[in-house]
Amino acid sequence: MISKFMENLSNPIRAKLLLELIAQEQLTTKELLEKFPDISQPTMYRHLKAMVTDGTLKVVGETQIRGTVEKSFAVSTDLQTNIERIVTENDGEGYLQLFTQYIISIMAEFKQYAEREKIDIQKDGSGFTIAPVYATLEELQEALIKVGEILMSLYQNKQTPERKLHNICIITTPPKA
């Protein structure tokens, strides 16, 4: 399944559809056509059908509308229910699929932000960085616990007009060989 997912991401039309479906959770073909007027209806149907067939997408609803059936689509999330199994069994392919879904979700948030009419990257508090560190497993775990404690204090904040929702995403890469 990972190869099909990655193959779909390498196709510009399918990548746009996947990012939008991840951002919106589920959409009908009509909604996708409205969002992407540059994609013709036959092309849209062909790509959606192919991604359902290969398991990347699933049909999550069907509505009868004047003699036709309008389908709602969502990204298949079968692996999300198997996270524990993936970690326990050290399933490399499953782990890569989870990571891919994680990254795609973050990309979808950045895509939505970048498409806004007005953005101010610094004022909006957006950004990303990398910090290469040499650490033992124990040192790494201790640092992540401290970061978690800092984030927990922010997590408990209530929404106010001044407090906007931000997602802080932390990735710890595997050690270099």
Image (tube, grey):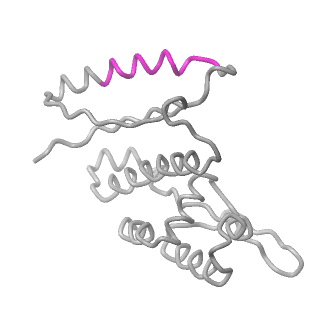
Find residue 49 and report its image quarter: bottom right
Whether residue 12 sits left or right of residue 145 in the image: it is right
Whether residue 58 sits left or right of residue 68 in the image: it is left
Q: Position of residue 39 (x, y in %)?
A: 62, 76
Residue 56 located within the stretch drawn in magenta? no
Residue at 50% in and 34% down: 167
Residue at 72% in and 67% down: 34
Q: Which residue ends up furthest to the left in the rendered image?
A: 177
Q: Position of residue 157 (x, y in %)?
A: 58, 17
- 46 or 93: nearer the eye? 46
Find residue 11 and report its image quarter: bottom left
The span picked out in magenta is: 144-158
Residue 146 located within the stretch drawn in magenta? yes
Per the picture, the main secondary structure of the magenta-coloured stretch is helix
> In which quadrant of the rendered image does the N terminus lie?
bottom left
Residue at 62% in and 42% down: 118
Up/down of 53 relative to 112, above or below: below
Q: Position of residue 9 (x, y in %)?
A: 43, 66
Q: Which residue ends up furthest to the right in the rendered image?
A: 66
Badge count: 0
Q: Position of residue 64 (x, y in %)?
A: 84, 73
Residue at 57% in and 65% down: 17
- 86 or 176: nearer the eye? 176
- 110 or 136: nearer the eye? 110
